[in-house]
């Protein structure tokens, strides 16, 4: 049994083809811009069995095959419910269903390595290259995350690196250059996807009685393009899902 706060069928932005995205509860981070704070606890959610979730997943199997799609595990941090995720990935594998993960990269490598090996595709965030700034805005430093990203790449997974673009936090030239240099020096990636901050999740903080610690603004189109072209100048592919 595990905790899932949303299941989205016919998803087109979480990987190749038509996908079912499963949002798993639990996250060891507390990003100040998180638009899914409801994932942080299991409050008022009934647990679901692997078997029941597989029934939903299997419903669209024909569409995954036809479109090159599959299942994407998101969250929260999907590796947080390690055993539940392991079982789901294993069951998809047995059915020949393609699997992807959207992860913060913050997990124990030893406990999660086998799951990553079994997954077909990995999206992983780099939120900030400065460890102290990373800690200020997410609650954890970036050491484990950067180490794990290198290990994922060394596995031959060619991840997509996602940068959540937060104005006045990580959109400055220095951080974008450092992120690009880290990728070039250490990784083999499919590309970088820039995800501009949006405030659609703000109402959830009020509903949950949570304080949103900082206020952020949505990046302008010009800013987004400037950041993308800076990354491209380093010879890194920009990807948009
Ligand atoms: S890693 Fe993702 S789910 Fe977790 S707090 Fe950050 S934005 Fe939210």
Image (cartoon, rainbow, N blue to C red):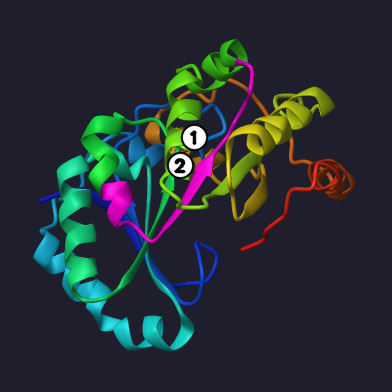
- Quadrant for the C terminus, please: bottom right
Seen in the picture, residue 181 relative to 121 is either above or below; the reply is above
Q: What is the x, y in percent for residue 104? A: 45, 37
Seen in the picture, residue 62 relative to 149 is either above or below; the reply is below
Q: Is residue 6 magenta?
A: no
Q: Dots 2 and 1: beta carbons under 8 Å?
A: yes
**For residue 165, what is the image quadrant?**
top right
Ligand 1 location (quadrant): top left
Classify mark 1: helix, strand or loop. Answer: helix
Residue found at x 29% / y 37%? 26
Classify mark 2: helix, strand or loop. Answer: helix
**For residue 80, what is the image quadrant?**
top left
Residue interval drawn in magenta:
115-130
Answer left or right for 132 relative to 84.
Answer: right
Q: What is the x, y in percent for residue 206? A: 47, 34
Residue found at x 24% / y 31%? 110
Residue found at x 57% / y 15%? 131
Q: Does the magenta stretch include residue 121?
A: yes
Instruction: Residue at the far top: name it.
Output: 132
Q: Which of 46 and 72 is in front in this view?
A: 72
Which numbered tag is attached to residue 150?
A: 1
Answer left or right for 191 relative to 229.
Answer: left
The residue that disc 2 covers is 154
Q: What is the x, y in percent for residue 67? A: 47, 84
Q: Distance between the residues labelled 2 and 1?
A: 6 Å
Q: Which of 148 and 33 is in front in this view?
A: 148
> Can residue 10 be spotted in the picture?
yes
> Can residue 9 be spotted in the picture?
no
State whether label 2 is within 8 Å of ligand 1: no
């Amino acid at each position: 049994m595990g905790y899932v706060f949303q299941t989205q069928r016919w998803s087109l932005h979480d990987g190749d083809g038509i996908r079912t995205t499963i949002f798993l509860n639990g996250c060891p981070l507390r990003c100040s811009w998180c638009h899914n704070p409801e994932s942080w606890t299991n409050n008022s959610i009934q647990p679901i069995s692997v078997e029941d979730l597989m029934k939903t997943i299997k419903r669209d199997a024909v569409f995954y095959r036809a479109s090159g799609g599959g299942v994407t595990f998101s969250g929260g941090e999907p590796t947080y419910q390690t055993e539940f995720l392991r079982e789901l990935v294993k069951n998809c594998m047995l059915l020949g269903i393609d699997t992807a993960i959207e992860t913060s990269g913050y997990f124990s490598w030893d406990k999660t390595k086998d799951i990553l090996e079994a997954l077909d595709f990995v999206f992983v965030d780099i939120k900030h290259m400065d460890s102290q700034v990373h800690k200020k805005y997410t609650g954890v430093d970036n050491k484990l995350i950067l180490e794990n990203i290198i290990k994922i790449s060394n596995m031959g997974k060619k991840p997509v690196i996602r940068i959540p673009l937060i104005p006045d936090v990580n959109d400055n030239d220095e951080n974008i250059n450092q992120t690009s240099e880290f990728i070039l020096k250490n990784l083999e990636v499919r590309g970088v996807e820039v995800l501009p901050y949006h405030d659609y999740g703000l109402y959830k903080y009020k509903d949950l009685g949570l304080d949103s610690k900082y206020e952020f603004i949505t990046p302008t189109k010009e800013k987004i393009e400037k950041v993308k072209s800076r990354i491209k100048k380093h010879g890194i592919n920009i990807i948009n899902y």
